[in-house]
Image (cartoon, rainbow, N blue to C red):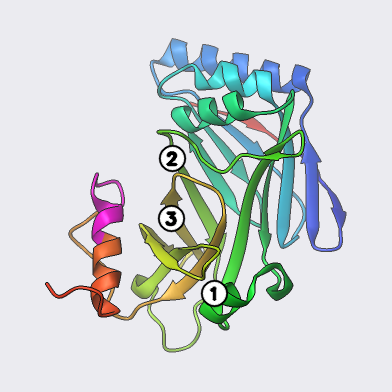
Amino acid sequence: ITPSVSGNMATAEIDAPAMDQAVESVLNAAWESGTAPVLEVIVSGEDAAGVAIRLPVSSLDALGKHESASLTVISDAAQVVLDSAAITAVAQQAANGQLTLAVTPADPSDLNDKQQAAAGEASVFELRLHSGGEEISHFGQGRAVVSLPHTLPDGQDGSGVIVYYLDEEGGLFPRPSSYDSATKQVRFSTGRFSKYLVGYDEHLPFTDVPETHWAAEEIAWAYVREQDGYSNGIAHYIE
């Protein structure tokens, strides 16, 4: 998809007939090959810092009914992967027939005083899903895997990069994270969209706890709390 660009924001839209055709194609291909249906939406050709894409809810609902399905939105600003449970949860919460997925760098003016104090000079990103003027913040039992651009400052190692959920009180909650030095992206998983801060901890990583481990989130949370002194002890492409 070729987006329209205004300032640093790239905006794109897929109409229902095109999305329905893509979903049908990927489901048929997956059935024939015995693989998971993976729908990739590529917003190409621009270097915008933020991206917003509008998607038809009915098509997402059809895709999410298949347990192993996933939706991937790829752009210069971010990559977002929703699993089937997340797709279904989002479609069920949509207020009308269309929803918008957006990822943007947060301006300091977008943060309250407590959030600004917690963020300092760190990069903060805002992830949003909304439909009919209503925010969709959680994915039920589903998960999203998000990749954000991040260039390592001199002297830092990629193994120390970690993403935190930033709440309204300025609280920082670690997410299972990993850094790819080749793509200069940090990847993390989450069950909700909100504000996220890209931070650094030189004592990371947990080399023996993959981010897919069932307790990865709890282990990361416990570790960071201890460091802070709280405890002692077949794909179809749309372009």
Q: Secondary structure at mark 3?
A: strand
Specify few, some or many for label 3: CA neighbours under 10 Å numbering under 14, 14-19, or 20 or more.
many
Q: Which residues are magenta?
A: 211-219
Q: Nearer the viewer, residue 227 or 17?
A: 227
Q: Nearer the viewer, residue 179 or 165?
A: 165
The residue identified by callout 1 is 151
The residue identified by callout 2 is 143
N-terminal of the pair, mark 1 or mark 3, is 1
Percent position of residue 202, x then y: 32, 81
Q: Nearer the viewer, residue 132 or 104?
A: 132
Amino acid under label 1? Answer: Thr
The quarter of the image holding the N terminus is top right
Percent position of residue 74, x then y: 62, 46
Tag of residue 69: none
Looking at the image, can residue 180 be seen?
no
- Apparent side of residue 2 relative to residue 67 in the rendered image (left or right): right
Residue furthest out toward the left: 233
x 25%, y 75%: residue? 230
Pointers 1 and 3 in contact (C-beta within 8 Å): no
x 69%, y 75%: residue? 108
The residue identified by callout 3 is 188
Pointers 2 and 1 in contact (C-beta within 8 Å): no
x 43%, y 55%: residue? 188
N-terminal of the pair, mark 2 or mark 3, is 2
Specify few, some or many for label 2: CA neighbours under 10 Å numbering under 14, 14-19, or 20 or more.
some
Specify few, some or many for label 1: CA neighbours under 10 Å numbering under 14, 14-19, or 20 or more.
few
